[in-house]
Image: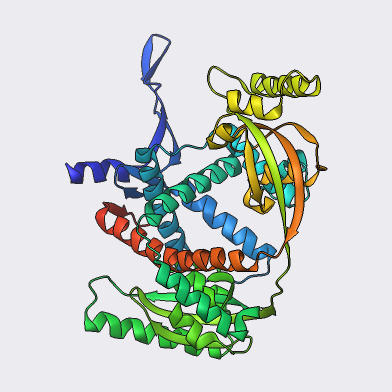
């Protein structure tokens, strides 16, 4: 049965115009059917497939971005291998998401893209035109964003249950942060992972170590880090050139921090033996970091979530009706929140308490930024639904202590998340049926 499925999937999908015969002068003349190649299967992933068109599209996008950024790329074979790995992982994650029931509605997707446009200081229309002008299909781009949102949610849900952070770990790192003067320095890191199999033999480890040593030799002789990362790295950031972003010493895995602390820009360290393989890290850049006061806001809100029964327009109109009642003195904000608002704050009359506005949904944060104390905000849409807001007060606070605790917890979580995420996707792949078909020559 497996062989039959494989044979069927290897077959190119054809669109055939079935013109079997035509009558002319009393004679029946056979006419050859026309065939048009549409697509073919590049890989089987459990019950799903990766199509060749998907591979071609992603390859084209990567090459386009590389050209735009004047970034060199590895060979087509090496690049295709990385692209196939990403698409296989995406397929597995989307299959898990479907089983978990993870969905992103059109309204949530539109709000996310609107937020992306605002971050680039563009209107939604201008953002859409920018995508099109760069040669991309906007609808494909839109669906890719949906896929990334679902993928992120599935990964978070699947990995966070594997992570435990003890109070002692938080206390230890807080104490260490207080002692370190290097906490004000952040490093922009690049990472290359030379993997070995989960059941690696000594020969496998020796071969991986030789590959890692060769990579370091190439980097020290001036080879392009991003190109080597795209070609050779088994890390999650391979297609981004191994970019790990900005991190201070405490945000790095312990094995990295001990080697990176005090190093200069362009320093290459490694190979560092980990549970997944040999890591090579480069300091791409260094910068200082300042601690500032944090503004907090005290606000209340009423949330109405659209549904099959309640349309977007009716939800918005209902909230506008609440504002009209408040302004007419017919009801208070808290009374209406207790009766109609959805979510845990309804029992408190919509009171959100004091909070850093950056912790809120982007649309909610933007709405608060335009308000004066005592004002009500007209109905607006966030990724959660429709809101109106009452802003009660603003204040500047020294949140160093609480921020440090929150930050330490996030640091420990991020530190463990990266490793557990890599283990999770590796285990998922090990348990899956995956077959990759060779590219036609």
Residue 334 visible from this viewpoint: yes
Q: Nearer the viewer, residue 25 or 374?
A: 374
Residue 289, x across and y down, in percent = 69, 75
Residue at (19% x, 46% y) in the render: 3
Residue 77 visible from this viewpoint: no
Residue 2, x across and y down, in percent = 19, 45
Total number of numbered discs in the rendering: 0
Q: Nearer the viewer, residue 164 or 362?
A: 164
Residue at (63% x, 42% y) in the render: 352
The C terminus lies in quadrant: bottom left
Q: Furthest-top residue in view? A: 26
- Side of 399 where 269 appears, left or right: left
Q: Furthest-right residue in view? A: 372
Q: Is residue 99 above or below residue 433?
A: above
Residue 337 falls in image quadrant: top right
Residue 68 falls in image quadrant: bottom right
The N terminus lies in quadrant: top left
Residue at (54% x, 45% y) in the render: 144
Residue 203, x across and y down, in percent = 24, 83
Q: Is residue 91 above or below residue 201?
A: above
Residue 321 falls in image quadrant: top right
Q: Furthest-left residue in view? A: 1
- Side of 358 where 232 appears, left or right: left
Q: Nearer the viewer, residue 255 or 222?
A: 255
Residue 4, x across and y down, in percent = 20, 42
């Amino acid at each position: 049965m497996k062989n039959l499925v494989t044979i069927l999937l290897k077959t190119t999908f054809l669109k055939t115009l079935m013109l079997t015969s035509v009558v002319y002068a009393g004679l029946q003349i056979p006419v050859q059917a026309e065939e048009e190649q549409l697509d073919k299967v590049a890989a089987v992933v459990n019950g799903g497939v990766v199509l060749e068109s998907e591979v071609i599209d992603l390859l084209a996008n990567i090459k386009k971005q590389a050209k735009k950024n004047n970034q060199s790329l590895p060979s087509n074979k090496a690049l295709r291998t990385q692209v196939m790995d990403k698409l296989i992982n995406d397929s597995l994650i989307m299959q898990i998401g479907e089983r978990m029931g993870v969905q992103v509605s059109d309204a949530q997707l539109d709000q996310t893209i609107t937020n992306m446009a605002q971050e680039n200081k563009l209107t939604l229309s201008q953002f859409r035109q920018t995508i099109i002008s760069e040669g991309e299909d906007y609808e494909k781009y839109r669906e890719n964003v949906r896929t990334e949102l679902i993928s992120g949610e599935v990964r978070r849900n699947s990995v966070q249950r594997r992570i435990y952070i003890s109070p002692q770990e938080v206390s230890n790192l807080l104490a260490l942060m207080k002692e370190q003067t290097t906490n004000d320095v952040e490093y922009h890191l690049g990472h290359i992972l030379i993997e070995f199999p989960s059941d690696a033999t000594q020969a496998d480890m020796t071969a991986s170590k030789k590959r890692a040593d060769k990579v370091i030799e190439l980097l020290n002789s001036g080879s392009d880090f991003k190109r080597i990362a795209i070609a050779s790295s088994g890390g999650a950031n391979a297609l981004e050139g191994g970019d790990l972003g900005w991190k201070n010493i405490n945000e790095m895995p312990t094995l990295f921090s001990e080697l990176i602390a005090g190093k200069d820009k362009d320093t290459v360290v490694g190979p560092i033996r980990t549970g997944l393989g040999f890591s090579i890290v480069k300091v791409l850049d260094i910068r200082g970091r300042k601690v500032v006061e944090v503004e907090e806001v005290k606000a209340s809100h009423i949330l109405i979530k659209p549904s099959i029964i309640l349309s977007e327009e009716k939800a918005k109109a209902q909230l506008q009706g609440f504002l009209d009642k408040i302004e007419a003195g017919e009801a208070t904000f808290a009374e209406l929140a207790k009766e109609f608002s959805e979510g845990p704050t309804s029992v408190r009359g919509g009171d959100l308490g004091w909070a850093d506005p950056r912790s809120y949904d982007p649309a909610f944060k933007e709405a608060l930024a335009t308000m004066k104390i005592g004002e009500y905000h007209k109905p607006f849409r966030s990724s959660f639904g429709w809101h109106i807001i009452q802003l009660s007060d603003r204040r500047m606070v020294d949140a160093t202590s609480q921020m440090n605790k929150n930050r330490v917890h996030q640091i420990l979580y991020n530190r463990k998340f990266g490793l557990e995420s890599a283990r999770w996707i590796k285990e998922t792949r090990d348990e899956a049926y995956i077959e990759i078909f060779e590219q036609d020559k």
